Image: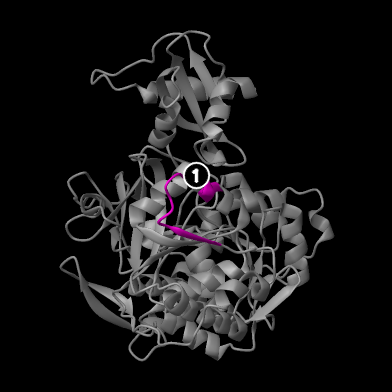
Amino acid sequence: MRTELDQQMDAVMATLTAEGGPLALGQVERFGRTLPYIAAAPPTLPAYFAHFCTQHRDVEFLVAGEERLTYGQVHDAATRVAHALADGYGIAKGDRVGIAARNSPSWIVLYMGTLMAGGVVCLLNGWWQAEEFEGAIRDVGVSLVFADPPRTKRLAAIPGLGDVRVETFDDLQPLEAALDPVFARAKGGDLPEIARDDHATILFTSGSTGVSKGAASTHFQVTQGVFNYLASALMMLGISQAAGVTSTLQPATLLNVPLFHVTAEVPVFLQSMAIARKLVLMPKWDAEEAMRLIDKEKVTYFVGVPLMSFEMLTHPNRARYDLSTVTDIAAGGAPRPVEHVRRIDAEMEGAPLIGYGLTETNGVGTGNWRGNYLAKPNSAGRASMPLVDLAILDDDGRTLGAGERGEVCIRSVCCFQEYWGRPDATADAFTADGYFRTGDLGYLDAEGYLFIVDRKKDIIIRGGENISCQEVEAALYEHPEVAEAAVFGLPDERYGEVPGAVVHLAHAGAVEAEDLVNFLAQHIAAFKVPHRIWIAADPLPRLGTEKIDKVSLRKIYRDRVGAEAV
């Protein structure tokens, strides 16, 4: 039976999306199917920027330390970047431009300017090491990379990258100083016409194959993802107003997750423009600094990986800060432990909520809100209205009924266009009728709430960051003394799970676990390096197919970790 909140959400959404409503729906064809889209959304991201930055021109948009910028100032700067790219750097429509940097106003302006110039903005993972950067840059054909000094140093370690231009900007400087060399190249020429089906963004995924793939989306797909989030925000605002709850505060949120992640890009950064929300940037996560900024800037909404809200919840200095302006404490990237959900509700003024989405869906998927989340704290929620069609499918693509376990699949106009240059991988990612196969296993209950129970893909999710087991194994095998390796997830209270590894050496005693950790740190990002490496004296167990039996290894070593914790 639907809850009262579900009924309210359905009623408000029906009003918003009805003919003549602010988010009225149209129809578009894809995969031979007719799918709904939000007709009011601008067709391209430059049109979206222009509309809302003009509408909110004098409203504060970005706060970064002492620097405060309005929507108008940010859009003006992005326009100058766009002209610099077109005039001074020779960026043509469709050229791929990478950003490899920490969060900063400059990052946001470079992102916007690249899209306004007709480029395809490639969100390079700032935690990568040189080899990982090289793989992504080569894979999608990036010709120009804007990088902060630490990332520039890593890029300089890549041999033969001479055909890729790297422009360094000092992200720790105010916007004008940081991007002055870029602005100086602007000549004011014409910018290209951009269509809704042109490529806009490439974000990188850690697939089960161990090879990072570039997930490319069009302008239409990204703006529809933004507007699906906007629909949820307006829905909850309508419910609050109907209950007599109003606020005179400007909407504000922390930007405390990396902009190269879809969560920071779409629902945090891009959605903020439509609701005149202030973004308070954090260059590095620190729970007490987050609470200080929430208090100082009157933050109204918080979102991060579950670890972040848990660290604020349990911080010994929490009582020193006024967090009462926060109405919702959201999480994504990994499930929250049930006890965390209940404690947030009992001990903090903001209400808990959680969302589930993927890079390939532009972050759009499901949401579990407030009282419904408390009632079903293990659930990722219902399909996000109005665009998401959620289904549980078996291996043959057959739709399963309530309570039956299968692969979680999402169909919507927000889903990405393709894995860049990989038509076979793209075809494998979708069913014939357009459902994206997430690789997660789960079921829907009678009310349509999603419960995720496992993963079909060989992926570890550490605090919201995807880690390919095969990629870490491949890095281990680069060491000459590693004969066999198996990587799997270990439970962890802070991060949900962390990578662990079991290794059998070619020569007993040749290296220690610490040596392997140090070796890996030179080749893969720190978050991918196993927290524990066990060296097995005997060859690793194998299945009848001669594959390493990772299921039994995972159980043995997870049990061992549990016994050690007792």
- Dot 1: element: helix
- 3 or 45, which is in the foreground? 45
Q: Which residue is drawn at 61% across and 51% down?
A: 150
Region of the chain picked out in magenta, as a range: 154-167
Q: Which residue is drawn at 40% across and 66% down?
A: 384
Image quarter hosting the N terminus: bottom left
Q: Residue at x 41, y 72 (%)?
A: 228
Instruction: Point out residue 397 in the picture as x, y percentages from the top left corner.
Output: 19, 50
Instruction: Point out residue 419 in the picture as x, y percentages from the top left corner.
Output: 30, 56
Q: How crowded is mark 1: few (under 14 residues within 10 Å), some or many (20 or more)?
A: many
Instruction: Point out residue 226 in the picture as x, y percentages from the top left corner.
Output: 44, 72
Q: Is residue 403 left or right of residue 519?
A: left
Placement of 181 over or under 433, stated as above or below: below
Q: Is residue 138 visible?
A: yes
Residue 423 found in image quarter:
bottom left
- 48 or 371, which is in the foreground? 48
| 163 falls in the magenta region | yes
Please state which amino acid type lies under the numbered disc 1: Ala
Placement of 518 over or under 333, stated as above or below: above
Placement of 515 over or under 166, stated as above or below: above
| 191 falls in the magenta region | no
Q: Is residue 135 left or right of residue 305?
A: left
Instruction: Point out residue 328 in the picture as x, y percentages from the top left corner.
Output: 61, 65
Q: Which residue is drawn at 30% across and 47% down?
A: 407
Q: Is residue 447 visible?
A: no
Placement of 563 over or under 141, stated as above or below: above
Q: Name the residue under label 1.
A: 130
- 8 or 417, which is in the foreground? 417
